[in-house]
Image: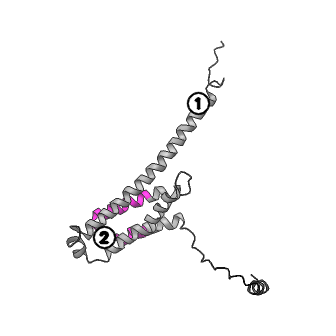
Amino acid sequence: MSWWSELGRKLRGEPEAPVLPELPPPPTGEEILGSVEAVRTRIAGRVPPSIAARVDRIAQIVGVMVPRLDRPSLGSQQAHTVVATATSYLPEAVDAYLRLPRDFADRRVVANGKTSLMLLVDQLDLLSATLMKISDAVSRQDANALIAHGAFLEEKFKGSSLNTPSTEA
């Protein structure tokens, strides 16, 4: 806004226009995958195989889902869950575990009769199961679209002369 317009606004007694913070752009597919890969790098040689396997499984699912994030069959809440899992939920859970001394994390009961290791396993299993449900739902929608398209083609070309072989000899 020019200084002249600003002066006019003040003289008219109009309130100052609120300054809205600029939101950062959503993460790119490369950034999402990079976040998961960074977790994999941080845990290398520092966690039990059961944790590494679960993180690898989550990484696989995220890898499959990232190219599908802009599809209409993936709802905004589902897309947000995939992105948040890769960039926030997974790194935060693993980093909290890594900050603990190994002996304490793996042997000391901290909540509900579980060690920090057991709690992390539960959290990783929940993330994995949630991502699998989202992936399955999107795949089911894509499969249904394929079935519907096949039915459309069948109906369209059912009586077509293109399908009937010629009996002329």
Q: Does 159 appear above or below 55?
A: above
Read off the residue under disc 2.
45
Q: Residues within 10 Å of mark 1 (few under 14, many from 20)?
A: few
Magenta stretch, overall SS: helix
Q: Which mark is residue 154?
A: 1
- Is residue 83 shown left or right of residue 111? right
Q: Secondary structure at mark 1?
A: helix
Measured from the top left, where is residue 109 in percent x and y?
21, 71
The numbered mark, 2 or 1, whose residue comes first in the sequence reads 2
- Look at the image and tell me in which quarter the N terminus lies: bottom right
Residue 125 occupies quadrant: bottom left
- Of residue 16 and residue 30, the one placed in the foreground of this image is 16
Q: Please say if the residues under marks 2 and 1 sit with CB atoms less than 8 Å apart.
A: no
Nearer the observer: mark 2 or 1; the answer is: 1
- Is residue 19 shown left or right of residue 108? right
Q: Residue at x 26, y 70 (%)?
A: 116
- For the residues labelled 2 and 1, the Cα–Cα distance comes to 55 Å
| Residue 1 colored in magenta in the image | no
Q: Tell me which segment is drawn in magenta.
A: 37-61
Q: Which mark is residue 26?
A: none
Amino acid bearing label 2:
Gly
Residue 155 occupies quadrant: top right
